Amino acid sequence: MQRGILLFLCVLSINTVSGCELFGRFDTPSLFKEGDIIIGGIFPILNKEILSTSTFDKEPPKVQCEGFDLRVFRWTQAMIFAIEEINNDPALLPNISLGYRILNSCASPTNALRAALILASGAEEVDVSSHCPPAISALIAESGSSQSIAVAGILGPFHMPIISYFSTCACLSDRTKYPTFFRTIPSDYFQAKALAALVKHFGWQWIGAIQSDNDYGRNGILAFKEEVEKFGICIAFVGTILRTYTKDRFLKVVEIIKQSSVKVILAFVPEGDFYPLMKEIVNQNITGIQWIASEAWITASRPSTPEIYTAFGGALGFVVQKMAIPNFKHFLTSISPHTDTHAPFVRDFWQIMVGCMPVLPGARTSTDDTTKRCTGNETLINSEHVFFNVTELRVTYNVYKAVYAIAHALHQLVFCQPVGAKTVNQCLNLSEMQPKEVIKSLQRVNFTNQFGDEVFFDENGDPPASYDIINWQLINGKVQHVTLGHFASAANGNYKLNVQEEKIVWRTGKTVPTSLCSNVCPSGTRKAQINGKPICCFHCVPCADGTIANSTGAADCTPCPKEYWSNERKDECIPRTIEFLKYHEPMGIALTLVSLLGASLSLATMVVFINYRETPVIKASNFELSSFLLFSLFLCFLCPLTFIGMPTVWTCMLRHTAFGVTFALCISCVLGKTIVVVTAFKATFPGNKITGQFGHAQQRIIVCSCTLIQIVTCVLWLTLNPPYPHMLFTYSNRMIVLECNTGSEFAFYAVLGYIGILAIICLILAFMARKLPDNFNEAKLITFSLLIFCAVWITFIPAYVSSPGKFTVAVEIFAILSSAFGLLICIFAPKCYIIFLKPEKNTKKWVMGKIIK
């Protein structure tokens, strides 16, 4: 690159003297026409370079190229046609003629740079003693991005405006590196978005890629990868090719394709680089692949043949919108080597079109040449060759549009007003026109041409992005390009993709294939990444319990809400079973019956005591306290009913407080009876007056005060932090245990602890009076009942903690009923036994122990 810049500076310095002196000749043929303003053009007409053994320091390099490209030759003719059309247009650049000089680049960055230096240094066709002809004011170049990078890099610092018609590399939009570069084809930045949107549209997640080993291919695939990764699409491999590669390197890429499981491959390569690989794929009969094409080869003529179609049929790709240029066909059919005998490339064109070698005046023919000679009567007027089909011009139209963009920029610069103004007067002398002024004028270009196409460049020198989606189809034995849809990008960065899938024909009428590294995970499963593989390769793992995936291809399982659980298929959340102790279930029925039985026995016992209250046994057991105790036991037996059924706010508050108050009342009554027994025993000692001090009033005070303490505790509990219904999820995944949360654990344990303290006090007092001499010793009965009471509640604690779900409530009910029955049976059963079965013992003497058996 530095050597090229030095060469260019030397050429410029030589051209500053009064005459023109060439630094050297590159011996490069060119299409040339004089004009007031010269527009340069670089095209890869011959697309394969033959290496020369000559060295630059001994003699000028001789560039030899082969491989005449009809498609590119039509691009050159489009430039010439546009210039001729502008010269004949009285409204555009009036009284100013445009000329051109078009060189071949051999599709090589080196030769493109050489051609750019030749064009920038001036024409070689003039006499060295004459004044210099005008240098080019703008350059239309190049087709390949690598070539354009070389040209824009060397001419950019010298403010030479360059307009490309086919270089799409997004890297060329960098205005800091290429400030003078413009183009009439959208950047690959937009094509990458379009290709990614197409891949996403068809659901392809596992694709391969082929790139050319140049700036166009590498940058294109890089931009494409960045886009598809946003959609979770993986690229299995990236094969690299170039037309100058050996056959072995092409075979390696073919082998990669054969070994891969991908069914969709993107080829981001120019036609010349891709065609050798295409032939090898056809030779090895590799079929069943959906090919995606970049705009560089999707409409090219060489690949679009029935032979190539066997492997590449149904290829999809994006191309710039097509356009038809009026009168262009007539211009193309008038090309003849007899019109301009010295015009380069025309003889090659004529030989391909007509099939014979034209015999030109002064031309020497070799005796060994067996090529058919033309008669001179050949014509192209009625030719049906695809070269003359000008109804679907794409890149050709980009060349045509580039010429008009330059013409409009020159018009605004020279006449200081847009095309179409009534008065046209020059405001700038052509000799004073500088390339950097042309650049500024290009930046302001904005016009609508005769086809209704708006031509302008954004701040990066790019045109608006608009593509057609093309599909290869074989119709009547010919490969034709069918338009399937459209892609357009807006200025705000959004885009819209429209695809008419009903028009797709993949190979012989098959549908578009799927391409996945792993099959889509069914509902109820999630993706599990495989170590060392791309994200598109995964196993399908069933969702864990409590999570679901209700759609296919889920990356993660979604947890169910707390009140729900996953079904067996793990694709739906179903409500959990709400568990609580119900009245209608067997255990609820049994506990209810036992509770009602206990309450009934308490009432029955109370009726018995009322009826036999005058008997010695009842009098000895303190009728009033016994009645209070029976009433409290009746309430204790009813208390479990609040524990059965669905917990609510009121039942939760009632069950704990009712339990605490009723049992406090019950134990308070037992405490009163115990104190009465102890005081009666103490009263047998001479001079002891304690019995008179512990009458009925004192008994009532003890019962009420002990119960009141519990009532106050429960009121504070309900006021500050009451119990409430609570859903418990820890016991079972498929059910919710609905229970009553105690609210304040301190209050709950205070209520239980208070009952425990009363029971222990009673037990101690009763134990002290257990050996009274009476036959009917109340203290013994109380002691035994409290032992049962304490044993029940001590064993209740571990059973309560370890019982799951509704069994926790059942254990609590069982403890309540057991302790209540213990008190009822131990204290009152002996009395009822004597009343009903041993009435002879129901006497004062027997009770006082004076009758001994």
Image: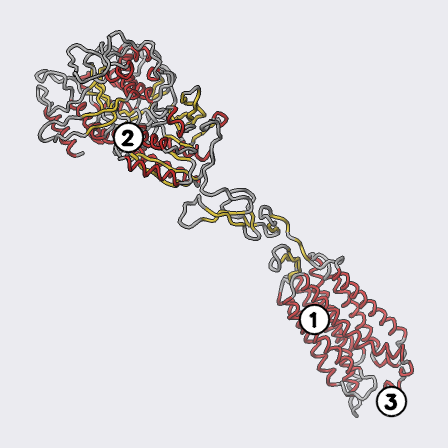
Q: Which mark sits nearer the N-terminus, 1 or 3? A: 1
List the single residue furthest toward the right: 840
Horizontal relation, residue 552 to residue 188: left or right: right
What residue is shown at x 20% (from left), y 22% (from top)?
A: 434
Q: Nearer the viewer, residue 109 or 653?
A: 109
Circle nearer the viewer, 1 or 3 = 3
Q: For residue 818, say whether it is visible.
A: yes
Quarter holding residue 191: top left
Q: Nearer the viewer, residue 487 or 27?
A: 27
Q: Nearer the viewer, residue 681 or 211?
A: 211
Upstream in the sequence, badge 2 or badge 1?
2
Marker disc for residue 853: 3
User: Residue 772 appears in which quarter of the rendering?
Assistant: bottom right
Name the amino acid type tagged 3.
Lys
What is the crowding at mark 1: few (fewer than 14 residues within 10 Å), some, or many (at least 20)?
some
Q: Position of residue 504 (x, y in %)?
A: 47, 27
Residue 518 % position (x, y): 47, 43
Quarter of the figure with the C terminus: bottom right
Q: As drawn, is 81 to the left or to the right of 624?
A: left
Q: What mark, if any, has residue 145 been given in the picture?
A: 2
| Pointer 3 with pointer 2, Cβ within 8 A | no
Q: How far from the left and from the top, in percent, is residue 80?
A: 26, 15
Q: CA distance from mark 3 to mark 2?
A: 127 Å
Report the residue marked by disc 1: 709
Residue at position x 73%, y 76% in the image = 788
